[in-house]
Amino acid sequence: MFSYKKTMLTGLISAFTAISVFTEDARAEFPEKAIEFVIPFGAGGSADIEGRLLANAMSKVLGVPMVPVNKVGGGGAVTYTHLKNSKPDGYTVAWASTSLLTSSGIGNIPFDHSALDHLGQVEFQPMIVSVKGNAPWKTFKEFADYCKANPGKLKIANSGTGSATHIAAVAVENAMGCKVIHLPVGIKRRNATVLSGEAHAAVGPLTATRRLAKAGKLRMLAAPTSERNPVAPDVPTMNELGYKADLDLFRSLAVPKGTPADVVAKLTDAMIKAANSRSFQDLAKKNGFTIKPLTGKDFDKRLEKDGAVVINIMKGAGIYKIKSN
């Protein structure tokens, strides 16, 4: 009887060991199929172009397709909700950004960045205050002086209420010390409303502004950032002009909470290699975003720092809504 039980116990241990080895072997083979690469914003915009190029470069590293899928809505809320509800197996990756912090703060999603796992930052870029090419304001100071003399008259377009460009626009408003009207017109109409005269100015990523500025249709006045961008060296920072405002737009990658550490490691390695690829570097030099991969605690610090800035701005504007995970 004792021998029988011993044999059974040995058999069970062997079975569990085999299952464990099989599981480890299966995980070691990641990825075995295409990976969904979710983009929070519409096709054709700067976020979409940058994300698709990164996904293509990551595909070459991983050996499987990274398939871009646009899930638009709620300033990123649709994408982040989809990601949170996805299986944590590495086959769903989101092209996240500062919008993760803003959509959480505005209450569009009932969770914050800690509800997801993060591969890390890929790049960042300034958000530019721009006006029409023939607008009467040649400098940001002239724009700010006009605002102070005409409170509540200037209209500044942004991507949507609670978006990163909206929060940056509020930061600009606060720094100028005057009231403006914020127009949440969406990404595709943000610059168009300035060109049509519906808005006096817009706040948008450098990558979405530079081409029109180069053509003379828009004039870039300043950026709420810490240092000038080499692609737009003539655009001053608001800080150097004496207006305190500093909020860049970062872009990063996130996966569902609980994704296995070894899978996260493989995806992170692919992210870094893709970010440093020739094609992505060329796009960065052309459009003006700064490639700076940040992972682990370094990216956690960025999330906490920018999150605090976003919450402070939102509270001041009376639009902060507390949600729980």
Image (tube, helix red, strand yellow):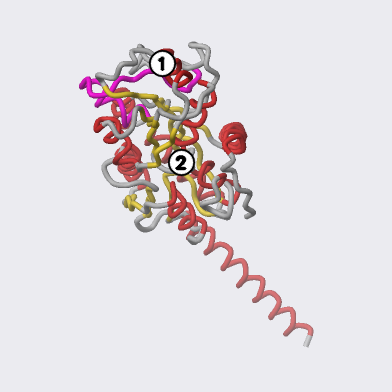
Residue at the extreme right of the image, as rendered = 2
Q: Is residue 64 visible?
A: no
The Cα–Cα distance between marks 2 and 1, rounded to whole angstroms, is 23 Å
Please tell me which residue lies in front, 278 or 313.
Answer: 313
Q: Position of residue 242 (x, y in %)?
A: 53, 12
- Vertical relation: 199 (above or below) 214: below
At horizontal 46% and vertical 30% (from top left) the residue drawn is 152
In-image side of 180 versus 68 (left or right): right
Three-letter residue code for mark 2: Ser
Residue ID for mark 2: 163
- Secondary structure at badge 1 equals helix
Residue at the extreme bottom of the image, as rendered = 1
Residue ID for mark 1: 140
Name the N-terminal-most of marks 2 and 1: 1
Question: Does residue 211 show up magenta in the picture?
Answer: yes
Q: Position of residue 159 (x, y in %)?
A: 39, 40
Q: Position of residue 78 (x, y in %)?
A: 44, 55
Eye-nearest disc, 2 or 1? 1
At horizontal 41% and vertical 25% (from top left) the residue drawn is 290
Q: Is residue 234 visible?
A: yes
In-image side of 204 versus 99 (left or right): left
Q: Which quarter of the figure is the C terminus placed in?
A: bottom right
Please tell me which residue lies in front, 223 or 282.
Answer: 223
- Secondary structure at badge 2 equals loop
Q: In the image, which disc is placed on residue 240?
A: none
